[in-house]
Image (cartoon, rainbow, N blue to C red):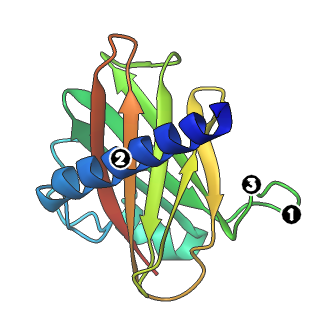
Amino acid sequence: MKLGKTFITTLAISALFAVSLSIAFASGDHSGGHNDGHNDGHKDDHGDGHSDHENGKMSGMFLKKKDIDGYLVSFHIMKPKDGKGHGGSHNLMIKVEENGKALSNIAVNSKVVHPNKKSESKMLMKMGDWYMAGYDLGHDGKHKIMILFKTADGKKHSGGVYYAR
């Protein structure tokens, strides 16, 4: 009986996550991950004076910062070094900041919708100031990257970006 309740609870949470992200993402950023001058007022660079648009293809890295409900959320995708992968061809890393300080007491779930419309969801594990999971993003096309995070006050926040290869 306990296993049945756990399954139903997990199923209900997953459905709520999918609906919340779909609604939030429908009104979100659809720039395709390019630094096209419309970046919510935040610099999308690596601190070296070059934009992600300039560095993204050369370095294999992707960094997009987005305001979600007053939190600055960094979406970082990169190919892992040998032996440093977390279950996919690319590591998805998320950092959530408030007033310039990374939040460490949050739960973060992620979902990727691949170009072929198949999707998968993963909880992100904490790694320092970042939360991380591995996804297979090595195929060409536009991937919808979505997150749902719960802050210490119990409120849920969701949003996403596109990652194009």
- Which is nearer the N-term, disc 2 or disc 3? 2
Question: Residue 84: image x %, image y %?
Answer: 81, 54
- Give the amino acid type for the residue marked by disc 1 in the picture: Asp
44 or 155: which is nearer to us? 155
User: What type is the residue that disc 2 sits on?
Assistant: Phe
Mark 2 and mark 1: Cα distance apart in space: 32 Å
Helix, strand or loop at disc 1?
A: loop
Of residues 79 and 44, the one nearer the viewer is 79
Residue sitting at x 36%, y 51%:
15
Q: Residue 60: horizontal and vertical position, in percent?
A: 58, 70
Q: Which residue is mark 1?
A: 82
Can you identify the residue that label 3 sits on?
A: 86
**Is 134 left, or right, of 31 in this rendering?**
right
Disc 2: which residue: 17
- Picture coordinates of residue 127, whole percent (x, y): 67, 32
Q: Nearer the viewer, mark 2 or mark 3?
A: 2
Q: Residues within 10 Å of mark 3 (few under 14, many from 20)?
A: some
* Distance from the alpha carbon under mark 1 to that under mark 3: 11 Å
Q: Residue furthest right?
A: 83
**In this orientation, does residue 113 appear?**
yes
Is 63 rendered above or below residue 57? above
Classify mark 2: helix, strand or loop. helix
Q: How many marks?
A: 3
Q: Nearer the viewer, mark 1 or mark 3?
A: 3
Q: In which quarter of the view is residue 91 placed?
A: bottom right
| Mark seen at residue 149 | none
Give the left or right position of residue 36, taking residue 10 as reference. Answer: left
- Of the residues tagged 2 and 1, which is closer to the observer? 2
Q: Name which of mark 2 and mark 1 comes first in the sequence.
A: 2
